[in-house]
Amino acid sequence: MHWYNFLAYFFGGAFLANSLPHLFNGISGRSFQTPFAKPPGKGLSSAMANVLWGFFNLVIAWLLIFCVAGFSLSDVRQALALGAGMLLISVLSARTFGRYHGGR
């Protein structure tokens, strides 16, 4: 397995984790931050914008995880690369957006 496959899994995990809050908030009909809000990342975007942005992130995640190379959840190294990407973006998002939604 080439090093760039693990890089694709890492970023695929980041895009996958990033899709979740946008999809959950959008499907629930709630506003949430997107890069398209004013100001970007701070203002709120509509539920529809969040559904579309979340789905876009999900498609990018799928392309990176499954189309770059054959991903196998039973391969520990591949799963760790995916999980590391998910963990990193999750921690960064919690720190960034927690201040807007009552987190610490």
Image: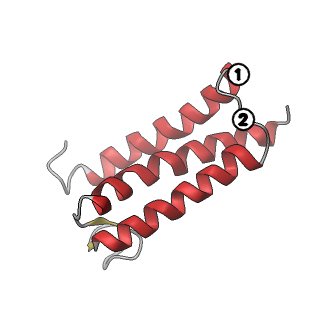
Q: Report the number of discs.
A: 2
> Could you say which quadrant of the image residue 50 lies in?
bottom left
**Image x and y of residue 53, in percent:** 45, 66
Label 1 Cα neighbours within 10 Å, binned few <14 / some 14-19 / many ≥20: few
Residue beneath the point at 52% across and 59% down: 57
* Relative side of 102 to 97, left or right: left
Name which residue type carries label 2: Phe
Q: Which residue is mark 2?
A: 71
Q: Which mark is residue 75?
A: 1
Helix, strand or loop for disc 1: loop
Q: Is residue 81 above or below residue 16?
A: above
Foreground of the two, 52 or 95: 52
Residue beneath the point at 45% across and 54% down: 19
> Could you say which quadrant of the image residue 80 lies in?
top right
Asked if the residue under mark 1 is in contact with the one under mark 2, i.e. CB atoms within 8 Å, the reply is yes
Helix, strand or loop for disc 2: loop
Name which residue type carries label 1: Asp
Residue beneath the point at 18% across and 44% down: 103
> Could you say which quadrant of the image residue 92 lies in?
top left
* Relative side of 55 to 102, left or right: right
Residue beneath the point at 78% across and 47% down: 68
**Image x and y of residue 9, in percent:** 66, 40
Label 2 Cα neighbours within 10 Å, binned few <14 / some 14-19 / many ≥20: some
CA separation in Å, label 2 and label 1: 8 Å
Q: From this viewpoint, which residue is outermost toward the front? A: 27
**Image x and y of residue 90, in percent:** 41, 42
Q: Is residue 68 above or below residue 22?
A: above
Quadrant (top left/top right/bottom left/bottom right) for the N terminus: top right
Q: Which mark is residue 15?
A: none
